[in-house]
Image (cartoon, rainbow, N blue to C red):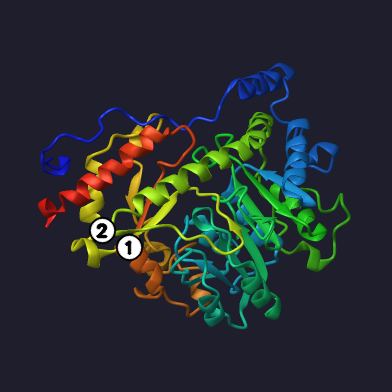
Amino acid sequence: MKLALNGGEKYRSHPFPAYNTIGIEEEESVLRVLRSGKLSTYLGTWHDDFYGGPEVRALESEWCEYFGVKHAISVNSATSGLYAAVGACGISPGDEVIVSAYTMSASATAALIYGAIPVFADIEEDYYCLDVKSIESKITLKTKAIIIVDLFGQPYDRDMINSLAKKHNLYVIEDAAQAPGAMLNGKFAGTLGDIGIYSLNYHKHIHSGEGGIIVTDDDTLAHKLRLIRNHAEAVLSAKGITDKSELINMVGFNYRMTEIEAAIARCQLKKLPDLLTQRLANTLYLNEKLAQIPCILPTQVRDGAKHAFYVHPLQFDKSVALMHRNRFIDAVKAELPPTLLREESTVLLSYGYVKPLYLQPLYQERIAFGRDGYPFNLSDVTYPKGLCPITEDMHYNRLVTHEFMRPGMSQSDMDDVVSAFKKVWENRKELL
């Protein structure tokens, strides 16, 4: 059977089903808000409405109950949540924040917003979260925080990293955008550090189009987060905040979530347990089937962890395939169709994830704000190629990710994915 990459017939031509979690419940919730006439009740002055409207407050309360946290603060995106978290921790110009090189860009630029310097640490070879030994090697007297990422839905090594952070008096900010519902030893991802951030962006497990939730058990941090979310500087005098130390990073923003987004998110939160159950079952099925392809290595899950599988990460063994990963995966992609509602993404199968962040022009040229290169001009930290060797090897040679385990995919759909891999493996001589 000739490979589609070489002009043969695709193994499957009809699209995969959409991942669409929006239903009648969300429609009714939106109509309820529209009929109320209150699409937002936030005021950027000291008033009861400083904390938002009824849907926002209900969502925050329900999020606290679900995840077992003291405070939940809704924002208009997880990016805003990361920025607010760095501000609440008192990060200042010239400070250093240890971040992952292998994540969405905002997990690192959050430090830059407050004039701090991102210092990139390498990832674990098996689990893709920050490696504790790499973190330790990056700590200096200027280090003030670690922004950890539960990449692909895998919880980070809480015991080792939190112990290290405590030893050096560092904040741990947990980016759990890809890990809602993931757990480590019975505790939810997002609640493992000092501050956690979840995403409600449209391609996450659950969503409200855009949006994010910040969680913490620390009263002081929660207070600062709420101020930063809603024009902090405008309410400080009304709240009687005049102490110099309390004014740090209290230039606020408009990070507020709308009532419609909050109403949708409330419906979505109720669906999270069932969506996770389906996602895990599908991943276990595909993990077992795809591991039968000799050059594909299955996902590993940390001891004591429940993985949320934002995507299904696999590794490619070039020594077995006798070809580069990209050549093999391009051939598999050619056998498969796009997914409904994601047609612009072509086939939801990729090699690598994002280019290691420190190789972006922002870091290579050390230019962020203004013509003088602030805040990089406060530091001698550099970003050479080879800085994080495991990250680079994963991105350029070994990592494979796909989204075919999403709820809505039938066993027949998944079997077509497996068969496409098998077809390429069995006809790999065409690629050599």
Question: What is the x, y in percent for residue 57?
Answer: 77, 37
* Residue 146 location, quadrant: bottom right
Question: What is the x, y in percent for residue 192?
Answer: 68, 61
Q: What is the crowding at mark 2: few (fewer than 14 residues within 10 Å), some, or many (at least 20)?
A: many
* Residue 49 location, quadrant: top right
Q: To which residue does mark 1 refer? A: 398
Q: What is the crowding at mark 1: few (fewer than 14 residues within 10 Å), some, or many (at least 20)?
A: many
> Residue at point 37% right, 63% down?
361
295 w.r.t. 81: above or below: below
376 w.r.t. 396: above or below: below
Q: Mark 1 or mark 2, which has the lower sequence index?
A: 2
Secondary structure at numbered mark 2: helix
Residue contact at pointers 1 and 2, CB within 8 angstroms: yes
- Point out the residue furthest to the right here: 240
Disc 1 marks a residue whose amino acid type is: Arg
Residue 230 visible to an observer of this rendering: no
* Residue 186 location, quadrant: bottom right
Secondary structure at numbered mark 1: helix
Disc 2 marks a residue whose amino acid type is: Arg
Q: Foreground: 44 or 226?
A: 226
Question: What is the x, y in percent for residue 84?
Answer: 66, 55
Q: Foreground: 158 or 279?
A: 279
Q: CA–CA distance between discs 1 and 2?
A: 7 Å
Q: Foreground: 368 or 105?
A: 105
> Residue at point 40% right, 67% down?
391
Q: To which residue does mark 2 refer? A: 325
Q: Foreground: 55 or 17?
A: 17
Q: State the quadrant of the C terminus.
A: bottom left
